[in-house]
Image (tube, rainbow, N blue to C red):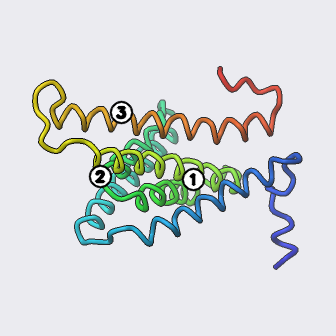
Amino acid sequence: QLRAIRSWAVWSLPGWLTPYVVGIILAELAAIGIAARAASFSEHNLAVFCLLLGCTAAAVELSMKAAAQGGVSTDVQGVWELPVAILLPPFYALVVPIARVSLTQIRDRRGTVYRRVFTAAAVGLSYGAASVVFHTLSRLAPHDSSGVLSRGMVWVALVILSAVVKWFMNNALVMVAVKGSDRTADVWA
């Protein structure tokens, strides 16, 4: 058992990169544990989550079929994850990328497992942060607003802010790993 763990490719990463990758994965697991305690597992939340997860699974399947048939495959698999972060408590946003990446790994085993696990953790933490930002700020927003800042406009602004938080955090987490594995990589290209 210990010998199998020692043979994992993650241990061959350069210097500080192994603790970084493992740290991000452990941070994701800790965040899931913390968020699970505060999550609401109502029938409504579970139904919405299952519906959006089904849409994610369909997007994974369709993009893989398009790529297999020689067509152009755009990575739209995560398009259903921001709605999870907005419509549901942060727990769901933390776990939905794990489900998507797991499905991708099952369907296409060509990727390095530790990279996919790291990617799921980084995306999960990013969507978790976006969810926390959205839900925290939406509680602070006036509920009876009208005029220039209608409730709908505030909601749209919070969704955009949450998407920016997700994008920035995900890029920051991933680019550190990319640059750490290849110092010559141009992370801004």
Foreground: disc 2 or disc 1: 2
Q: Earlier in the sequence, mark 3 or mark 2?
A: 2
Residue 124 is situated, as x and y percent measured from the top left of the image, at 52, 52
In the image, taking residue 23 as reference, residue 43 lies left or right, namely left
Assess disc 1: are there few (<14), some (14-19) or many (≥20) residues with their C-alpha within 10 Å of its C-alpha: many
Q: Nearer the viewer, residue 28 or 80?
A: 28
Sequence order check, earlier mark of 2 and 1 = 2
Q: Is residue 33 above or below residue 93?
A: below
Q: Nearer the viewer, residue 46 or 145?
A: 145
Q: Which mark is residue 120?
A: 1
Q: Quadrant of residue 171?
A: top right
Report the residue at 52% width, 58% height from top: 98
On the image, the x and y values in percent for residue 145 come to 14, 37
Secondary structure under tag 1 reads helix
How far is disc 2 from disc 1 in space, using C-alphas?
20 Å
User: Depth check: 114 or 95 in front?
Assistant: 95
Q: On residue 87, which mark appears?
A: 2
Which residue appears at 29% of the width and 52% of the height? 87
Q: Earlier in the sequence, mark 1 or mark 3?
A: 1
- Residue position marked by numbered label 3 in the rendering: 160
Give the residue type that dot 2 points to. Leu
Specify the amino acid type for callout 1: Ala
- Give the mark toward the camera: 1 or 3: 3
